[in-house]
Image (spheres, helix red, strand yellow):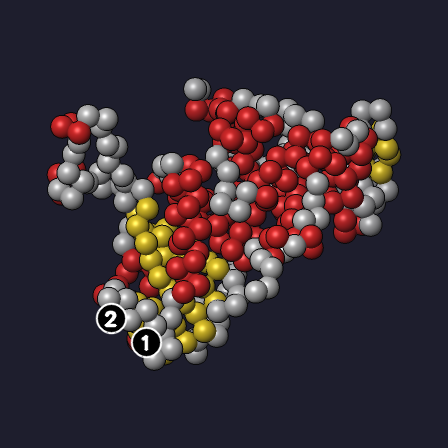
């Protein structure tokens, strides 16, 4: 049997040990090379794109000769107003990409020796940056569609007598949401968070090209897809795959998202479900990339992403 990709040395091109050994200068050079890769790793003005800049080595800032804008390697990016050493952001990104089932803020905080709140916001900034990579995806060809419910669990009491019957409608929290995933066979993965599966049909029409062949199970919500696509249906209660119809890849996506929910986050708040759903799509799509390339891609996405509207100054705003 062929060795699993993640067990080969080709998959292991990133060393957390090497990152922690970096000097401040080395970490700064690494960020500079990634952020300004379009200019061969030499700083250029983020405001007017001018490549003529003054370099102030001691404070590690540059000033644009054209517009006088002064900037650092992280200003205007998702890591703007940074509180940690650049080495810590490189390490956080390494821990994040290495965690194939995702990572909780609690664990990231412990690994980095930073406060929970710091780790929480940092991980969400990384999710926001990589989500942008997934956001413009258009799918075509053979496409699998499937849905699953997440969230809205009723917490169980310790005493058996106090436990609730979760099947009773009165015990449902009404917070359950559907994640619908659309997955191009051997291609990209696109998740949507909707109240119920049928709500995803309009979104699927926007993102899946006409003429595509859609594989879906027999859930009633997918009947409307027949009006727009050639649809192959599979009945899970009868056979796993009938007449070649199959949603295995969509299901492996859900298995990763479910393992993230149960194994790392224990509970995913509805507010953040979309962020985790997209993170897991990114992980599925990049699962055969060496971790060094993944680290490079995630760091580049973060340094190419504008200041976060959601996560910049988050704890000051929520006043916790
Ligand atoms: Zn400028």
Q: Quadrant of residue 247?
A: bottom left
Q: Which residue is mark 2?
A: 238
Residue 143: % across, % down? 43, 69
Q: Helix, strand or loop at disc 2?
A: loop
Query: Going by the picture, which residue comes out furthest to the front?
Result: 1
Q: Is residue 12 visible?
A: yes
* Position in image of residue 164 (x %, y %): 16, 34
Disc 1, ligand 1: is the CB inside 8 Å?
no
Q: Is residue 96 left or right of residue 212?
A: right
Q: Nearer the viewer, residue 122 or 67?
A: 122
The relative height of residue 136 versus residue 80 in the rendered view (above or below) is below
- Disc sitting over residue 242 in the figure: 1
Query: Is ligand 1 less than 8 Å from the beta carbon at label 2?
Result: no
Residue at the location (29% across, 58% down)? 197
Circle 1 SS class = loop
Residue 114's label in the rendered image is: none
Residue 218 visible in the picture: no
As displayed, is residue 292 above or below residue 25? below
Quadrant of the drawing holding the N terminus: bottom right
Say few, some or many: other residues with alpha carbon within 10 Å of mark 1 (under 14 / 14 to 19 / 20 or more). Answer: few
Mark 1 in CB contact with mark 2 (< 8 angstroms): yes
- Residue ID at (80%, 24%): 59
Residue 95 location (% of width, % of height): 60, 38
State how many labels appear. Answer: 2
Give the percent coordinates (x, y) of residue 189. Answer: 48, 60
Q: Quadrant of residue 92?
A: top right
């Amino acid at each position: 049997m062929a060795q699993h990709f993640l067990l080969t040395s080709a998959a292991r091109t990133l060393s957390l040990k090497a990152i922690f050994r970096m000097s401040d200068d080395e970490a700064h050079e690494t960020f500079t090379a990634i952020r300004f890769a379009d200019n061969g790793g030499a700083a250029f003005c983020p405001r007017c794109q001018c490549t003529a800049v003054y370099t102030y080595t001691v404070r590690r800032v540059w000033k644009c000769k054209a517009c006088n804008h002064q900037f650092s390697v992280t200003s205007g990016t998702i890591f703007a107003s940074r509180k940690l050493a650049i080495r810590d952001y490189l390490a956080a990104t390494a821990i994040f990409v290495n965690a194939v089932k995702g990572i909780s803020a609690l664990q990231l905080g412990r690994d980095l020796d930073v406060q929970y709140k710091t780790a929480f916001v940092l991980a969400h900034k990384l999710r926001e940056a990589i989500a942008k990579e997934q956001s413009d995806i258009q799918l075509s060809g053979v496409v699998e569609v499937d849905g699953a419910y997440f969230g809205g669990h009723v917490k169980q009491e310790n005493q058996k007598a106090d436990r609730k019957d979760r099947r009773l409608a009165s015990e449902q929290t009404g917070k359950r949401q559907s994640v619908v995933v659309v997955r191009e066979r051997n291609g990209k993965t696109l998740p949507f968070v909707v109240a119920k599966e049928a709500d995803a049909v309009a979104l699927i029409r926007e993102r899946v090209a006409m003429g595509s062949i859609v594989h879906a199970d027999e859930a009633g919500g997918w009947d409307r897809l027949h009006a727009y696509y050639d649809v192959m249906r599979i009945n899970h209660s009868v056979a796993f795959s009938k007449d070649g119809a199959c949603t295995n890849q969509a299901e492996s996506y859900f298995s990763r998202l479910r393992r993230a929910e149960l194994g790392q986050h224990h509970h995913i708040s509805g507010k953040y479900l979309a962020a985790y759903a997209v993170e897991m799509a990114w992980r599925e799509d990049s699962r055969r990339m060496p971790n060094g390339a993944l680290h490079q891609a995630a760091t580049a996405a973060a340094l190419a992403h504008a200041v976060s509207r959601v996560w910049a100054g988050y704890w000051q705003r929520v006043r916790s």
